[in-house]
Every structure is written in structure tokens, then in C-alpha cells.
Image: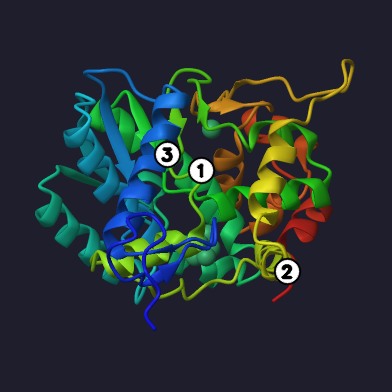
């Protein structure tokens, strides 16, 4: 006998919600999912009427669902936002070029303006070229640092007030676990925040409207809505460390579905004892971007690439930053250490 929707009691249930276990029909699932994102936005006061909001769009399921839901809620609840799509082209052939085609179709489908910023134009390096130099071990470090800054630069070009990203509950729980495993207290304190205020010039506030949405539900929403998204993984993944955190969480989730939300709540309620040393935010002396060192991570990584010393930005070489700033050459021994890359 067909199971009826536990919400309307009228239509046939087509899915069991991973988050609550309720059997729902399509219409009731859409309503529940959208209503929860709306409640997240309203409760955390994420937007103000009249703001220009850039949606970080990669063509993947999360950002495609985010763009769809943001447009829908903006109209349904009259948020009064001006929405735009903002994409980063990392220069990964066979991956990002294809996913950007999806973003371009989304732009037509959702009738939103689109801005694409590329690593090549911003840094003079594509990820393809970076991987050729650094190998496949630390590539995601370069990519992650460059993306963060690229999004800010794109947002400044578009003059948006805020960027929203498609990070979902699983991503955030993974980040909490990774920061615990790394002992990174500063990031652990920040990573569950639903929004960040501007941390300085050139840094645009960010928020995560899908913070409490389970990845499984995002996939179901995209599937039942027949959204046009790109599902291939990056050819340079997996980012090994995150991959382990992800597998660990998936195992936990299979025995206890609330694990994801439980980890987020634990992260949200952590407080750091007074007196624990935290990095002090300043600005990069070269590019002006926020940094707790004299040079920001992006400038150090770029310097390493341009000098053919890929390990410069990997690990701690703060001592050398001053040398870079005053353009003092490295010693032979220092150069040798920074050249070795383990493939
Ligand atoms: Fe960049 Fe790594 Fe993500 Fe690929 S997997 S897009 S290299 S961060
Ligand atoms: Zn810099």
C-alpha cells in the first residue's frame, strides 16, 4: 500500500526526509525545505531590504539550489534584495570550464547578472599551471586561499553588500571536525558562524543560508525540482584531509542521522577561555588584504609560485616573509628546502 505524506495526509509520499525521517510528498518537501531556509535567514537576520547580494555560484548542487531558493524566497517573502551570481574560474580544464557552462545556463534560467573572475586574470596562474608546478598534494591549499580572495575581489567589482555561499550543514560539521583534529582554535571558533562581518577593507561580509540544510536534502531538492547542475568532481580532488573527515561523518550519520546537527551545535556552543592566544588580524603589507602576518597567505603562495619555490606558502616560514618584503634574496639552503615537493 502506498505511504501517504505525513504532512498533508493527502498525496503519496515520495521520499523520507533524511533530517526528520518524515515521509513526504514532493510539494510538502519543497515547502518544508524552503521554509527552513527562510527561517534560517530571518532568525539570523542575514539580509536587509535593498541590499545587493552576490551568490557564489560554482554550477554544483549546493550553489545551484542556493541560487534557486534565494530567488524564490526573495520574491515570495519580498526580501527586497538585488541578487547576482558570482563565479570563480580556477582554470581547471575538463572541470571548471564545464561547470561554468552550467552557471551560464543558470544565469539565463534565473535571469540574474553574472560576474566571473579568474585566477589567471587575478594571479597570472591557472590551477592547471599550479598543479604542474606543485603537484597534487597541496593544490587545494593554493586553490582555497586564492578562491577566498577572488570572491572578495569579484564582490568588490560587482559592488555587492554581501556574498552568500552554498555551504551546507555537512560542510560545516566537516569543518568543525577538521579544526578539532588540527587543533585550530581560531578557525574552530569562527567556522560555525552563519555570517561574518567585514573584517577590513576589501573583505565583503559573507553568509551561509543553507547552514542547516543537509546535503542529502539538497540533492533531493535539486533532483525533484529538476535543477540544472554539474555533478562531476574536480579532477584534482580529493582534498585528502577533508575526505577523511567526510567519510568519518557519513559513517556517524548512518548510525545517528542527527550527528551532523549535533556537531554543528557543539561547535556553536564552544567558547574559548580568556587568555588563549589568538592571531591578531592586520593587513597584508603587499596587497592590503586581511592577514595576521606581514604578508597574506595569498601573496606568499604567489611569491612561491613566481619564484619556483612551491613550498614557501606550505607550512610555517614566517621568518622569510620579511626577506620577501625587503626583497632580500634567500640563502641557498633556504631555497633548497622550499623547492622539494613530494609528489
Ligand atoms: Fe580547487 Fe581542490 Fe576544490 Fe579542485 S578540489 S576546485 S583544486 S580546492
Ligand atoms: Zn597580500
Q: Earlier in the sequence, mark 3 or mark 2?
A: 3
Q: Residues within 10 Å of mark 1 (few under 14, many from 20)?
A: many
Q: CA distance from mark 1 to mark 2?
A: 22 Å
Residue 211 is tagged as: 1
Q: Position of residue 72 (x, y in %)?
A: 21, 43
Q: Are marks 1 and 3 in contact (CB under 8 Å)?
A: yes
Circles 3 and 2, Cβ within 8 Å, touching? The answer is no
Q: Which residue is mark 3?
A: 209
Residue matched to label 2: 255
Point 21% across, 42% down: residue? 71
Q: Which picture quadrant has residue 140? A: bottom right
> In what quadrant of the picture does the C terminus appear?
bottom right
For label 3, the SS is: loop
**Visible residue check, residue 276:** yes
Q: Is residue 261 left or right of residue 163?
A: right
**Disc 3 to disc 2, C-alpha distance:** 27 Å
Residue closest to the eye, 258 or 25: 25
Amino acid at each position: 500500500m502506498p505511504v501517504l505524506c505525513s504532512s498533508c495526509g493527502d498525496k503519496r509520499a515520495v521520499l523520507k526526509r533524511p533530517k526528520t525521517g518524515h515521509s513526504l510528498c514532493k510539494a510538502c518537501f519543497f515547502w518544508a525545505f524552503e521554509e527552513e531556509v527562510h527561517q534560517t535567514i530571518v532568525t539570523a537576520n542575514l539580509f536587509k531590504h535593498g541590499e545587493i547580494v552576490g551568490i557564489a555560484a560554482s554550477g554544483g548542487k549546493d550553489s545551484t539550489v542556493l541560487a534557486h531558493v534565494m530567488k524564490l524566497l526573495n520574491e515570495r517573502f519580498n526580501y527586497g534584495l538585488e541578487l547576482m551570481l558570482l563565479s570563480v574560474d580556477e582554470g581547471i580544464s575538463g572541470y571548471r570550464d564545464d561547470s561554468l557552462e552550467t552557471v551560464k545556463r543558470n544565469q539565463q534560467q534565473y535571469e540574474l547578472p553574472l560576474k566571473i573572475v579568474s585566477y589567471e586574470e587575478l594571479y597570472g596562474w591557472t590551477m592547471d599551471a599550479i598543479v604542474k608546478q606543485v603537484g597534487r598534494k597541496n593544490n587545494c591549499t593554493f586553490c582555497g586561499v586564492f578562491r577566498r580572495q577572488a570572491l572578495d575581489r569579484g564582490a568588490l567589482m560587482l559592488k555587492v553588500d554581501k556574498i552568500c555561499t552554498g555551504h551546507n550543514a555537512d560542510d560545516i560539521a566537516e569543518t568543525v571536525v577538521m579544526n578539532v583534529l588540527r587543533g585550530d582554535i581560531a578557525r574552530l571558533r569562527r567556522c560555525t558562524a552563519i555570517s561574518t562581518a567585514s573584517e577590513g577593507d576589501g573583505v565583503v561580509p559573507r553568509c551561509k543560508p543553507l547552514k542547516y540544510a543537509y546535503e542529502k536534502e539538497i540533492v533531493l531538492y535539486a533532483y525533484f525540482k529538476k535543477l540544472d547542475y554539474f555533478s562531476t568532481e574536480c579532477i584534482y580532488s580529493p582534498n585528502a584531509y577533508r575526505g577523511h573527515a567526510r567519510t568519518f561523518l557519513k559513517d556517524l550519520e548512518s548510525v545517528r542521522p542527527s550527528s551532523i546537527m549535533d556537531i554543528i551545535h557543539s561547535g556553536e556552543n564552544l567558547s574559548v577561555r580568556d587568555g588563549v592566544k589568538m592571531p591578531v588580524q592586520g593587513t597584508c603589507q603587499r596587497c592590503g588584504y586581511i592577514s595576521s602576518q606581514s604578508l597574506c597567505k595569498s601573496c606568499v603562495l604567489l611569491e612561491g609560485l613566481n619564484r619556483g619555490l612551491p613550498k614557501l606558502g606550505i607550512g610555517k616560514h614566517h621568518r622569510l616573509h620579511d626577506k620577501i618584503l625587503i626583497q632580500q634574496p634567500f640563502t641557498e639552503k633556504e631555497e633548497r628546502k622550499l623547492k622539494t615537493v613530494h609528489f
